[in-house]
Amino acid sequence: KELMDDPDKGKWTYKHDALNRLISQTDAKGQITKLQYDKLDRLRKRIDDAHKPPQQQEVTTWLYDKSYKGLLDKVTSAQTTRSHHVALRQKL
């Protein structure tokens, strides 16, 4: 999808990379959100207000556990940090 022209939300545009991952979206107000992915195609970073200077942008990052199947470990933004812990079950 490259364009949405909604009667309520207005005109939005979308950009994708060569792997067809969404990398940028611009809403009807001209606000830009950019997305970055890691080598495993997992969302790594979202930059809201990317059209503004860096100090005014809102950045959210996703970190994945490197030792246990690459599951989501932590989500961090300017307002909050959320950790995700996986309960491991061991068979005796």
Image: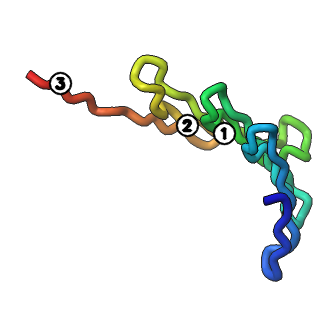
In the foreground, 84 or 25? 25
The N terminus, quarter of image? bottom right
- Image location of residue 3, percent across then percent down: 85, 64
The answer to whether the residues at label 1 and label 2 have Cβ atoms under 8 Å apart is yes
Q: Gap in Å between the C-alphas at discs 2 and 3?
A: 27 Å
Q: Which residue is depicted at the point 49% across and 38% down?
A: 82
Q: In which quarter of the image is residue 29?
A: bottom right
Mark 1 or mark 3, earlier in chain: 1
Circle 2: residue type: Val
Image-based side of 58 in relation to 43, left or right: right
- Residue furthest to the top: 67
Residue 12 visible from this viewpoint: yes
Residue 58 visible from this viewpoint: no
- Label 1 neighbourhood size at 10 Å, few (<14), some (14-19), many (20+)? some
Q: Mark 2 against mark 3, which lies toward the viewer?
A: 3
Secondary element under disc 3, as helix, strand or loop, is: loop
Circle 1: residue type: Thr
Q: Which residue is identified by label 3?
A: 90
The C terminus, quarter of image? top left
- Label 3 neighbourhood size at 10 Å, few (<14), some (14-19), many (20+)? few
Image-based side of 45 in relation to 9, left or right: left
Image-based side of 58 in relation to 54, left or right: left
Please tell me the numbered disc located at residue 48.
none
Q: Which residue is identified by label 2?
A: 75
Circle 3: residue type: Gln
Secondary element under disc 1, as helix, strand or loop, is: strand
- Image location of residue 63, percent across then percent down: 56, 29
Q: In which quarter of the image is residue 38?
A: top right
- Label 2 neighbourhood size at 10 Å, few (<14), some (14-19), many (20+)? some
Please tell me the numbered disc located at residue 60.
1
